[in-house]
Image (spheres, rainbow, N blue to C red):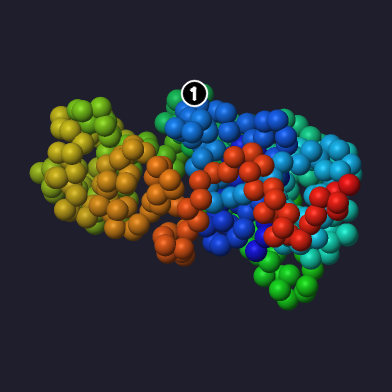
Amino acid sequence: MRVLDLTRLLPGPLATLLLADLGADIVKVEEPGGGDFLRHLPPLTSDGTGGMFAALNRGKRSIEIDLKSAEGARLLRALCAKADVLVEGFRPGVLERLGLSPQMLLEEFPRLIVCSISGFGQTGPWRERAGHDIGYLALSGALARCGADGLLPPQLPGVQIADVMGGAQSAAIGILAALLERAQTGRGRLLDISMTEGAMGALLPYFGAQTGHGPQARGDDMLSGSHPFYRVYACSDGRAMALGALEPKFWQRFCDALAHPEWVARQFDRTLSAELDALFLSRTRDDWCAVLGPLDCCAEPVLEAHELSAHPQHAARDLFVDVGPLKMLRTQPALVQAAHLPRRSAPQPGAQREEILRDYGVTESDCG
């Protein structure tokens, strides 16, 4: 599968990385003289490449095209003639102004799948509005549910949920579905991916929970951290444990292990949280792992990113791949063997121009 990737930053590059790990050939199309902003964002790797860029663009090839020029527009159309998918993340209306509207590309190349990723979608009054993950989460309703009960303002999650779930994963799923459809119909399609709407999907259970009961405020549900059995607890060494003893049998095991059988009946008693806060602060995270780990009571250590590769579960699942001197997290461990993953480092700007043109059957004269 041939994919032209016109995107930058996080959502689009992650979507095409998902496809790359599934075997697609990804050609990253960058503007001359700078390319993707993430190339230059610290921390930098030993070759001067931004670390986030290196992680998101491994296994891809790069070509520089000035889409604002007539020659660049002709070159992109020549590549589209041989591509399966084009992914773009410009604000709605940008490609139209360049004479490369998704609708026009689909009409010219009926088998092409054009996936547009934007903050708010290709239609509606917010379509051209600037934004980032924080704004998409705010407008989706997801941000209002983040943080402890009664704590204002809501707390930002430490990962970009709208970018990853709403943008990258929604785009990859949509592209795969469109490829299946094309196999039956022979025609491509336009995909309109809104990161805000994708993040809104995380609220699906809450819409069910509030049916017939009105709006459900943050902290009202059992999984908000306000109940003692489903909560993150600080430990004496500055680390933390996550307890998810939701089912009664797990809560029973937890209480029995701590020699507090009287707590069993207090599973939903929020005042018990303060007692457990004090108890967890009496030992280190590793001490709690030793006590609770063998019990199978849904208690796990809160791992930092640098600890992941050493954890025995993650090590056994072959979740990491060495790309040059860097250890990278893979995207599809359940679907693709590590030996089959692309191991090429993130490309330098325009480094594969000649081979890309050759593979696509395009000559420089086609652009003139």
Determine if residue 85 is in view.
no
- Establish if 303 lies above or below 78: above
Which residue shows up at 62% across the image and 49% down it? 61
Residue occupying the far left of the picture:
259
Query: Is residue 154 toward the left or the right of residue 224 in the image?
Result: right
Q: Is residue 79 visible?
A: yes
- Residue at position x 40%, y 52% from top? 321
Residue 76 point in image, percent of width and height: 80, 49
Q: How many marks?
A: 1
- State the image coordinates of residue 193 (x, y, percent, origin top left): 69, 49
Q: Amino acid at mark 1?
A: Leu
Name the residue located 58 percent from the left edge and 43 percent from the top edge. Answer: 347
Front residue of 127 and 359: 359
Q: Position of residue 362 (x, y in %)?
A: 79, 57
In the picture, which quadrant includes the N terminus?
Answer: bottom right
Q: Residue at x 33, y 44 (%)?
A: 308
In the image, residue 106 sits, relative to residue 37, either above or below, namely below
Q: Nearer the viewer, residue 157 or 85?
A: 85
Q: Residue furthest top?
A: 152
Which residue carries the number 1 mark? 152
